[in-house]
Amino acid sequence: MLSHFQAAVLGVLQGVSELFPISSLGHSVILPGLLGWPIDQNADSFLTFVVATHFATALTLFVVYRDDWVRIIGGVLGLISARKFLPMNPDAKLGLLLIVGTVPAGAVGFIFQRQAQKLFISPMAAALFLMLNGGLLYLAERLRKNANGSEDLSRIDSRIAARMSWRQSAKVGIAQVLALLPGFSRTGSTIAGGLLIGFSHEEALRFSFLLATPTIGAAALLKLPALLHSGSTVAIENALLGAVCAAAAAFVSIKILTRYFQTKTLTPFAIYCAAVGLLSLIALG
């Protein structure tokens, strides 16, 4: 069972590492192993804690981008009510692109949920995948098609809707499947996918954050009832504490990353993941 201190630390860690391209699951598995915390990461109480902190992160993303979500959801509902798919306004198309991008990870996660959970208890596997995540980020920077940043961020959603095809959205969604492995970053894989189809860093980050909201939120909502019916006061307290810490850390992370990717690249994160993964393998071996 987590202590309150451990819950707070892991909550902050989740809020930061979920949105930074460095893998929240990987860090949540590796850190307790390195610190020797006696946590049963396969226990229902720990899994529900992880779900609660993920839900808090998704909720924070929704709140930060609430005006955009109102437009997107309104566009999709308007399209459905009109029963006419062409012509399609940018908000409606972006909403459908997000649905297409959500399907691959949702389907694979639902089918292989138990197999993926078994990897949660292996810090060595998480460290190896973290190294591979660094390689993915580095390759994405080397192979990306668009070397220029976006000039007008106020029209970024319209540009994404205009430039992105249904197939490209599916490709980014397939890249997101990697995040089911602890050590691979959901944000990192979707940004990498965005760069490889020609997005700028800002556009790739924007689509990644929008895609994260339904992906993380839906997965968390499915598991939250198990927490509420657990009957364990300590487990619920830890989950709430971790969720608050994750939400605060996620809010700060969104602000930092939005500014960072206006001029910077994934390369520092690639180096970080490769180095931390290698050092963790050595320390755990």
Image: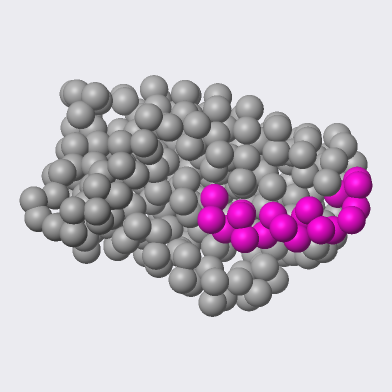
| Relative image position of residue 251 (x, y in whole percent) | 55, 27
* The C terminus - image quarter: bottom right
| Residue at image point 77% right, 44% down | 239
Q: Is 184 on the left-hand or right-hand side of 192?
A: right
Residue 237 visible? The answer is yes
| Relative image position of residue 60 (x, y in whole percent) | 55, 34
Total labels: the figure holds 0
Above or below 248: residue 45 = below
| Relative image position of residue 202 (x, y in whole percent) | 30, 33
| Residue at image point 65% right, 74% down | 114
Residue closest to the eye, 94 or 35: 94
Q: Is 94 on the left-hand or right-hand side of 220?
A: left
| Relative image position of residue 83 (x, y in whole percent) | 18, 59
Does the stretch in magenta take in 227?
yes
| Residue at image point 19% right, 37% down | 158
Furthest-front residue in view? Answer: 81
Above or below 265: residue 168 = below
Residue closest to the eye, 259 or 163: 163
Q: Is 87 on the left-hand or right-hand side of 40?
A: left
Q: How is the image coloured?
A: one colour
Magenta region, residue range: 217-235
- Majority secondary structure in the magenta region: helix
Asked which quadrant contains residue 100, the reply is bottom left
Residue closest to the eye, 244 or 4: 244
| Residue at image point 42% right, 53% down | 189
Residue 195 visible? The answer is no
